[in-house]
Every structure is written in structure tokens, then in C-alpha cells.
Image: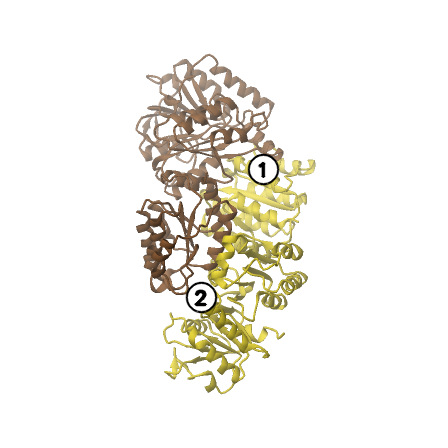
Chain colours: A yellow, B brown
Amino acid sequence: MKSLTSLFEAQSVAVVGASDDPHKLGGRPIAYMKRLGYQGQLIPINPKTSVVQGLAAKPSLEALDAPVDLAVIATPEKFVEGIIKQGLACGIKNFVVFASGYAEINEEGINKQQQLEALFKGTDARLLGPNCLGFINTETQLVASFTTAMEHHPLKAGGLSFAGHSGALGAYWLDKTIRANLGVSKWISSGNEVNIQLADIVEYLARDPQTAVICLYIEEIRQPEKFEQALLLAKQQGKPVIAMKGGKTTAGARATQAHTASNPFNGADYQAIFDNTDVIEVASLSEMIRYSEFYLGENQLLGQRIGLVSISGGAGVMLSDQLTEAGFCISDFSDDLCQKVRPLLSDFSALQNPIDLTAALVAEPDMLKNVTNELIESEEFDAIVIFMGLMDSIADKLAAGVIELKKNPNCPIFLIWMGGQKQLLVKISETGVMVFEEIPELVALMSKLAK
Amino acid sequence: MKSLTSLFEAQSVAVVGASDDPHKLGGRPIAYMKRLGYQGQLIPINPKTSVVQGLAAKPSLEALDAPVDLAVIATPEKFVEGIIKQGLACGIKNFVVFASGYAEINEEGINKQQQLEALFKGTDARLLGPNCLGFINTETQLVASFTTAMEHHPLKAGGLSFAGHSGALGAYWLDKTIRANLGVSKWISSGNEVNIQLADIVEYLARDPQTAVICLYIEEIRQPEKFEQALLLAKQQGKPVIAMKGGKTTAGARATQAHTASNPFNGADYQAIFDNTDVIEVASLSEMIRYSEFYLGENQLLGQRIGLVSISGGAGVMLSDQLTEAGFCISDFSDDLCQKVRPLLSDFSALQNPIDLTAALVAEPDMLKNVTNELIESEEFDAIVIFMGLMDSIADKLAAGVIELKKNPNCPIFLIWMGGQKQLLVKISETGVMVFEEIPELVALMSKLAK
């Protein structure tokens, strides 16, 4: 099988059905690549005009001087087959088809999809889709997609890649990476998977030097053995894989059939595959982004011993309960650590884990940094969780303290700051400290990361 | 036992240890009541000055012309006992003590607390605290508290009340109600519970005509039988009780001891009590606020049949799976409903539950309202879940459609709008539609509400 490199790293792209209107399906890919500065050659294809969005256009794929690396077909379904035939005839090896109306709708659609598939038999050419949102490669700012997720935003390059059966969930994922200021490498919507399937894409991402963490949304696993091999390759390469699995129930499976003609009950045992390959399964995109942040921050898997520092006694109680129930240990302090921490606390604070800073913190905001630093330096903990709430009047000083603490690499710090000031929380996040609003979401993340 | 009415609905308040500085512990209650317009009589007590924050002050409780309904003691611990003796001697029946340094710290503190307790033996006077943040009654804007949660905000009166063992968690709860624009009736921090305990407070709230929904944070249940009776009374009054329970594990219990001298392992079986009285247990304040919104919106408990309308096929799959796993039924449409919905959808949409609106929605934003309305009118569902994502270009029209739908009382609508515009989401929330960012948080809420 041919590598997907020439597809996902195409140096020249023709957009068939190119539109002058940057909001139309055939106009978006061109508008995005113009705005973002695609580093390859971009050729609109439109039989009715010689200029599209200011670029010289060709009337058809046949009229190209040389075959492009990639043809993006943005036309309605009825034109797709003819265009692919033309493209194949003139030596184009990679196609993306956006159109719907194939195996996901009815018998007639299944036939049409089989006809598409037949065109590629015996060739080394490849098709992404149909019924997909295409793909994005931020290295070269190649946008073979009409997704609106990055309509108003630049695309930051980075180590996070996504592939999946839902273009819309992919779009929301992309939007969430933008909001979380995470850099993205490849973004791939595989649709009905006529001849490029998730197994192929995961293999590509596992080998892709720019990809550090792989996110997946999976409906049907079409080549289970190959898929498992690809996941194992990712594991060998040290790339965490974080997945959402759709179609686990009869109701969900019925919905996948109408969505991407997927049959999740095809015999592939996703749970066994995930277990064998250390895939982290999540239930939401927000959770997926949280795990991605953790791994992109070059954090390591955690041990069990957690040190807690809280401004609220009640929050310390809830954290102790929920972390203990998740299998962590709120371990006792050594005598040595007690001696070091005692002079830093008010008389009302008990010398135990969790430490309750009490309202004494207000008069002495450095207490947070100083106490936590002793916990880190003691090497008695595998991670420290800090709980803050409100504290507007000293928020600047507390935030500066947390940022200072992050410089100590001894153990990771997690911060919950309930009702915290958004700007400060962004500033803290940028240093690599993960910030949460609530206890259960932190505990859920930690419990999946501790092994 | 004397009712707590004269405490929580005090018509006259003396603040002992009154400060001219509105940011100090003894200055905050006065500053808040002045700003918010407390409807009763407010008298600062300070031996060194005759005017505090512009109000005429008295040198001591003894110097009052008549006993006030309530004395708020904002002094350090060492003065508390003497002040209470004075107050009792001159006929004051209700006290709040903020000071820490009692049973939560050490043996000496336990003795001090027992001495306080002894002062009230054989009297009908009552003490809230010590080691507490006091209470708030929004009906009269009585703020017997130094919590900073509402420092920059008005306090909106409404049907939601809170009582609990953590003043800080209470403060964050108050902050969250302000952000969610929910009205609050009583807010009570019970601290070490020398002679007013949660059981008493819940009984009061169950009878309080202004309280519609009761939120609790519980460490030790000190009078289990009375507590259960109070919860039953709330149930009989049709008031839902939503609780967070701290101190379920050994580590958590150790933290409650240092926090409010609580022993959660005193033999009271909180789980049995919650089960017997239909208390809804939650793991976070955010969840608590979500349930409160549901009940304050006069929503009813849900049935099992859920109709799904989604802009994303993948999200429809995830919703189907997660709702099915939570015990709901993504039920089939009747032939009649199919006939009504068919002409409203694009040819690419399958006629099944969940409905995938597809990108056809962009050209025809009314499709959301029209399709959902047919589902509501069919009476084939106990609730409708709408999933939207992004859709900035038509967001106004979609939001107007959802608001229009809410007017139909046939069944509740829940909305997930991933990456939605904040202002529009607030507008939709204000009509009583609950809005979520993610699927799991909605499913968790629905599964606890369906009975």
C-alpha cells in the first residue's frame, strides 16, 4: 500500500468546483489557503471562468499542464465520478470528495459508492471520503476542507493530530484547540472511507514526525488487525492515542449507519484493541482536549501519592474523598516535612495532608508558594493539587506564585481555581500548569493518567 | 426547641467588633448591609468610637437600649465568651460567632468549645458557629457574614437556599448562583455546630415559605434521626434537596476533623438517609447549580423517551450511546411523525431518531425549529435534546427558534451548543432552557432526574 504522504503533504492542489464566493463549499478551501498562505501550488478548476478569487483557473483537470498532487472535488455528487475518471486518466494520485449521497443514504447510494471504489481498483491512487470534510495540514497550511471551525482564526502548528468519522465533531475539536491555544499538525475527516480508512490514517500519523499526540473519533473499525497494528506502532513511537468511540449501543449503531454507513457491530472488539494498545477512551471532546494538554505539556504518567494544598477546608475534604475513591493516596507528611511547613502556616492550620491554608492566606499570599514548594522539594509526592477559589484581591500574587512553582520540575502541579479570573488562568495555563474549575473533572483526568 | 426564625429573620442586628474598614472581618457585614439596604436596625458595637461606617455605634451589648434580635460576633476568639455572657445577660437570644480556634484545632480548643456550649444550657438562646462564615437572608438583605463572594455584586432574591459545613464552598456556591443569575433565599454556614446543627437548619428551610430548593454541603451528620425527619419534611413540602457529602473516606474524614471537628464515621448512614428521603447527591458545586436550575425552572422529573435533533451525525451517535447507557430510550418515530417530518428535512437526512439536520440547516435555519416542533407536538417523547455546534453565521436565527420552541409546554427541551456564542446562550438560558457545552454533563443530569 502506498503511503499517505503524497496526499497529506501535497505540494500542489487543484480545487474542482472552485467558487469565487469564499463562503461556498467550493470557495472555502481556496479562501482559507489564500488567507493562511498555503506553501504549495493552488489551482482552481472552473469551466466557466479563468480567474477564481484572484487566482488563474483551469477549465478542467484535463487542462492542467501537469498532474497535481491532489484534487479536491467540491462539486455535487452527480459530477464526482466523471471528475475522478478524468483525474485518474491524467495521472492524479490523490482525491478528496466532500459530497454526500452515498452508502449513508440508501441502496442507490451504496451502488454509487461501489462504482467510486471500483475506479481505484488496480491503481495506486487514493480517495479520502466521500461524505467527509477533507483534511488540513498546518505545516504547509494546506486546507483541503470546507470546515468553518477556523473561519475567523489562524491555525497554529503543533503536535496534536485528529482523525475521525465525524467532520462536525472534528470541527468542534478544532475550535476547542483554538480556544485552548493548542498547536495542531494534521486534521483528517475520513467520512465513508471508500479506500482510505482510519487504520491507514493512524499508521500515517504514527510515523508522521510532526504528530506527537493522536486524537480519534471512531464509528466502525473496518480493518481491525491493521488498526491494532497502527495503534501499536503509535505506542512504540511514544505517541499517546486518545479516542472517542461511537456506536456502542443499538441506538448509537443505527445512528452511525445513517451517518457514515458504519456498522460498529462488525465483530471488531474495540475494547480489546484499546486495552492492548493503551488507547485512552474519553466520553467528550472537552475531555479529549484536556488529555491532549497533559501530554503536549510533556507530563509523565503519575504515581499514587498526592499532596493537597487548599484554601478551603471543605474542598480539601472533597478532594481527599474523590482522589481516594479513584485509587490515589493522600499520604501523611514525614516529620521532616512537618517541621519545614509548620512555621509557614497559621496556628489554625492542622499539620496534615490536605493542608488548609485558611483565610490567613489573605494577609500573606506567599504562603501558597512557600508551603507548596516545601511539598514539592520533599519528593514525598507524585503530584500536587492546589485548590483556590475566588480571592480576587490577591489573585495576581497567587498566580505569580503558581507560575514560580511550575519552574520546579520535581512533580507536576494541578490547579483548581473555582471562580478564578479568566485572564490569570490563561496566563497560568500557558506555563503548562493544567487549570480546572471543578474537582471531579481533575480527578477523572488524573485517574486515567495514573498507571 | 425554639424555631430559628428569630435568628435568620432578625429585625435588628448588632455587630460586635465593628470596624470602620469595610474590608476587615468586622467591617464587611456592616458594609454589605449598608450597600444592599438591610431592612432592619443595624448597630455597630465598638468600645473605642461612637461612629462606625457612618452609623451610630454603641460601646458594648450592655449599652444597647433594648436587646437586638441578633448579635454577630466578629472579634478574635479570646473575646467571644465574655461577649456572649454579656449578650445573654441583657436578653439577646441569637448569636453568630465567626472566630476559629475551637474543637477543630486541638484539646484546648475542644475545651473552649465546651465552655461556649455550656453558656447556652438551660436557655432558649442559640448560637450559629463558631468557626463559620455566618448567614445571609436576601429577603431583608441581612448579611450576618464576611464572605467575599458577593463583594462586587447585588444579591438577587429567589427560591434557592444553601446550608453547609464549609463557608468557602458556600462562598463559591454563592458566586456560582450570581454567575448563573439564580435567586437565593437563605445562605447559611454552620461551622462547628455548637448548638445549631444542619438538622435544625434543614427543618427551618423545609418550613421557610421563601425556600423552594435546598442545597447542602455535609461533613458530619450530628443528629441522624432529626436530620432524616427534616429531609422528609422537605420532601413532603415538595422541596428538592441536593447535597454534596464530604468525609466518605478515611482521608476525607481526617480532613473534616481538622476542618469543622466533624466525625463523618459517627455511625450515621448518610447513604440510607439520602435514599429514604430522595436527596440528590452530587460531586461538585457546578452540578449542584445545574440541578438547582432544573428545579427552579419548574421542570418535572423526566420519562424515558428521548427525541434527538442534531446538526452533527457524530454527536447524534454519542448522544444515542450515552443516553442509552444511562437507561433512556431513543425511541422510533411513528409513521405519522415520519410523514410530518419528511418534507422538512433535506434528502440526505435519514428519517430516524436521532435526526441529523446536516449542513442543509445553514441554508434553512428554520428547519431546527420546525423539525423539533413536530417532535414536541407528537407527544411521543418525554424530553427533546437538541445538539448544535458553532454555526456562527446563523446563530441568531437558531437561538430565536429555540426560544420559540420553549413556549410549547409539551415536553422539556435541553440544548447542547458546543462552542456557542456566550451572549446567545445566556439569552436562551433566561427562558428556562438548560444549555450545556458537552454531552456527558447533560446525560449525567438527565439520568439523575429520570425516575
Q: Which element carries disc 1, helix, strand or loop?
A: helix
| Vertical order, B355 against A332 (above or below) | below
| Vertical order, A318 against B384 (above or below) | above
Q: Is residue B16 visible?
A: yes
Q: Nearer the viewer, residue B1 or A219?
A: A219
- Residue B77 at x, y = what percent? 50, 25
- Residue B192 at x, y = what percent? 51, 26
Is B154 displayed left or right of A143 in the figure? left
Residue at position x 38%, y 14% in the image: B91
* Count of numbered tags: 2
| Vertical order, A36 against A304 (above or below) | below
Residue type beneath disc 2: Thr
Mark identifier at residue A147 = 2
Residue at position x 38%, y 72% in the image: A22
Residue topped by disc 1 = A321
- Residue A422 at x, y = what percent? 45, 50
Is A296 displayed left or right of B184 in the figure? right
- Residue A327 at x, y = what percent? 64, 42
Q: Is residue B389 visible?
A: no
Residue at position x 66%, y 47% in the image: A303
In which chain is the residue bearing label 2? Answer: A
In the current view of this chain or complex, which residue is farthest to the front? B335
Question: How many C-alpha atoms fall within 10 Å of the one at disc 2: few (<14), some, or many (≥20)?
Answer: many
In which chain is the residue bearing label 1? Answer: A
Q: Which element carries disc 2, helix, strand or loop?
A: loop
Residue at position x 52%, y 24% in the image: B224
Q: Nearer the viewer, residue A216 or A250?
A: A250
Residue type beneath disc 1: Asp
- Mark 1–mark 2 Cα distance, whole angstroms, equals 43 Å
In the current view of this chain or complex, which residue is farthest to the top? B122
